[in-house]
Image: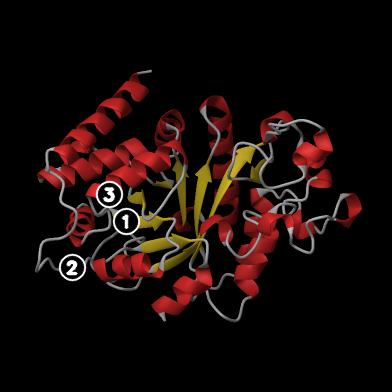
């Protein structure tokens, strides 16, 4: 309840600032990018050395959060990916699996198979989900060649997949010269999210990739749990924390007062959807979350700045020019061509 009140107050303050003209839409003429090449934060990159992050592992080109999407990105001869971004939930029997939404309804044949809606990972064991769901059933409006496959005909790379299995696959193709990085968002809340964090920590530690992985969550209770129990994890700010940081930048405050336990800011850019999307779009109507001024401010406090979900080439170029550290996109080839 307290966190919800704080979030509401923060949003109201933001709206008030926008309405009173305290927020500027863009940089003032002459604003320059301040390089942060001496930063100790490995997710802060040299100017215009923007990392390409495949959002939901390339959701625009392959069924999101499936092994097929990872294979598409890794095997492509047209582009390279620096960061894989994906989302996780925990199943009834304690396995952590890839899924963005809270249910499988919108991306698979779950409603058809179970005969009801709201099919959530937490209500079923991993094997049941793995053996019966086709996560490509609704890709491209259900018109893909594999959309109608069911049962034993479903290829392995379109079945429900565990985090450990995906990361073992990507790490086989990761190199010492250019190792893959990861952004993994825990979607579950409360105890489920905390259990998910426990499991994820073990997987990352066993694979030796903790320093290359950013763990994200929009659930404040889960974020606090991670900060307390796993301080060696690299984490990003939740929505409220990121907004507070941004407000500090607007008024020229000292962000050290926030005592952040995160080292990465992940901000929306471009059109979004849903309730949060409405607020994000409203905020972006009045201000530029990807301005040079803000990115300079974040870098001053050793904070990496990454943006989601950017599918417009003009917005991509704007963020590149302004010094963003990473851009998450559903269309990695499009961003790669722009960067190269």
Classify 333 as above or below 199: below
Residue visible at 32% across and 56% down?
305
Helix, strand or loop at mark 1: strand
Pick the residue in front: 20 or 27.
20
Question: Which class describes the residues within 10 Å of circle 2: few (<14), some (14-19), or many (20+)?
Answer: some
- For residue 45, say whether it is visible: no
Furthest residue in direction top, as rendered: 1
Q: Is residue 31 left or right of residue 201?
A: left
Mark 2 and mark 3 residues within 8 Å of each other at the beta carbon: no
Residue visible at 35% across and 61% down?
42
Mark 3 and mark 1 residues within 8 Å of each other at the beta carbon: no
Per the model, the C-alpha gap separating discs 2 and 1 is 13 Å
| Residue topped by disc 2 | 33
Residue visible at 15% across and 60% down?
27
Pick the residue in front: 215 or 334.
334
Question: Which class describes the residues within 10 Å of circle 1: few (<14), some (14-19), or many (20+)?
Answer: many
Residue visible at 73% across and 47% down?
108
Image quarter in which the N terminus is found: top left
Task: Give percent across and percent down for residue 227.
Answer: 40, 36
Task: Give percent across and percent down for residue 195.
Answer: 58, 32
| Residue topped by disc 3 | 285
Nearer the N terminus, badge 2 or badge 1?
2
Helix, strand or loop at mark 3: helix
- For residue 51, say whether it is visible: yes
Per the model, the C-alpha gap separating discs 3 and 1 is 20 Å
Nearer the N terminus, badge 2 or badge 3?
2
Nearer the N terminus, badge 3 or badge 1?
3
Q: Is residue 225 left or right of residue 187?
A: left
Mark 2 and mark 1 residues within 8 Å of each other at the beta carbon: no
Helix, strand or loop at mark 2: loop
Q: How is the image coloured?
A: secondary structure
| Residue topped by disc 1 | 305
């Amino acid at each position: 309840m307290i966190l919800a009140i704080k979030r509401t107050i923060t949003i109201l303050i933001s709206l008030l600032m926008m309405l009173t003209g305290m927020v500027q839409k863009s940089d003032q003429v002459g604003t320059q990018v301040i390089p942060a090449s001496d930063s100790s934060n490995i997710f802060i990159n040299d100017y215009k050395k923007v990392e390409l992050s495949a959002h939901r592992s390339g959701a625009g080109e392959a069924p999101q959060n499936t092994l097929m999407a990872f294979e598409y990105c890794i095997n492509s001869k047209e582009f390279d990916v620096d960061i894989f971004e994906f989302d996780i939930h925990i199943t009834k029997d304690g396995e952590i699996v890839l899924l963005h939404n809270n249910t499988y309804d919108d991306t698979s044949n779950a409603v058809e198979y179970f005969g009801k809606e709201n099919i959530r990972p937490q209500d079923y064991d991993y094997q049941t989900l793995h053996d019966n769901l086709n996560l490509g059933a609704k890709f491209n409006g259900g018109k893909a060649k594999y959309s109608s496959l069911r049962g034993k005909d479903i290829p392995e790379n379109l079945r429900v997949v565990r985090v450990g299995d995906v990361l073992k696959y990507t790490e086989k193709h990761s190199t010492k010269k250019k190792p893959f990085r990861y952004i993994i968002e825990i979607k579950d809340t409360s105890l489920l999210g905390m259990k998910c964090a426990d499991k994820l920590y073990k997987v990352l530690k066993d694979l030796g990739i903790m320093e290359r992985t950013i763990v994200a969550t929009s659930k404040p209770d889960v974020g606090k749990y991670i900060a307390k129990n796993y301080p060696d994890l690299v984490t990003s700010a939740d929505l409220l924390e990121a907004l507070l940081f941004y407000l500090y930048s607007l008024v020229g405050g000292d962000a050290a007062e926030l005592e952040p336990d995160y080292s990465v800011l992940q901000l929306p850019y471009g059109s979004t959807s849903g309730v949060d999307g409405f607020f994000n779009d409203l905020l972006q109507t009045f201000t530029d979350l990807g301005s040079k001024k803000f990115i300079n401010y974040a870098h001053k406090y050793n904070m990496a700045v990454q943006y989601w979900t950017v599918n417009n080439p003009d917005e991509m170029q704007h963020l590149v020019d302004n010094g963003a550290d990473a851009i998450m996109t559903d269309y990695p080839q499009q961003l790669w061509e722009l960067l190269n």
